[in-house]
Image: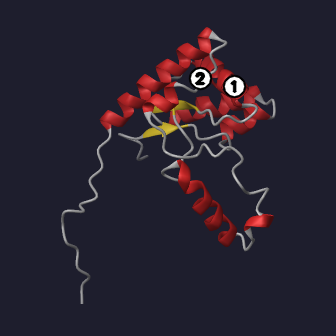
Amino acid sequence: DHVEGLVALSGCRDGEIARRLRVGDREGAAAVARGYAERFGRFYLELQHHLLPDDDWLVTETAALAGELGLPVVVTNDVHYARPEGREMHDVLTAIRHGRTLDTLADLRRPDGESYLKSGAELAALPPASDPAVAAAWGEGLANAAELAASCSVDLGFEQYRFPGF
């Protein structure tokens, strides 16, 4: 009921569509994508590459799904910390949250070290270069990301004082 003006994205590799693709449920992924596209006027399939072993495959499959369904793509990065050097602090916070030590965090530690806020140039350097169709989808996704970013405005009002009421 309240989707006017919203932009919906498909999510990271752990999102419903990517999860379905990763387990071979292409029809289920397509059905979910169609449902989101119907529910939200502006729905984009996300292309992400974090240098993980199956990222080339997942980007290729997601781009192909977008083409089949006539949905736009957007290049994003799964951001968990602002800069590459923030990975260690992220691991510390994850260990605290799960009541573990850093030595026992292996299964929860992000294996790629790529979950930081990347520049457009860094994202542009990531697509799989072997397939021209995927490279074209990646370029379209970068352009769409820039367009979406330019259309967003956030005002947190930091220039105003907000004193608590007494």
Up the image or down, 147 lies above or below 12; here it is: above
Q: Nearer the viewer, residue 42 or 85?
A: 85
Where disc 2 sits, the SS reads loop
Up the image or down, 29 lies above or below 89; here it is: above
Residue 93 visible in the displayed image = yes
Q: Which mark is residue 46?
A: none
Q: Earlier in the sequence, mark 1 or mark 2?
A: 1
Residue 9 is situated, as x and y percent measured from the top left of the image, at: 52, 37
Q: Using the numbered discs, state the Cα–Cα distance from disc 1 to disc 2 in whole angstroms.
A: 8 Å
Residue at the spot of label 1: 56
Residue at the spot of label 2: 127
* Crowd rating for badge 2 (residues with CA inside 10 Å; few <14, some 14–19, many 20+): many
Residue located at (48% from left, 39% from top): 118
Residue 80 visible in the displayed image = no
Residue 150 is situated, as x and y percent measured from the top left of the image, at: 31, 34
Left or right: 119 in relation to 115: left
Left or right: 153 in relation to 6: left
Residue located at (59% from left, 23% from top): 127
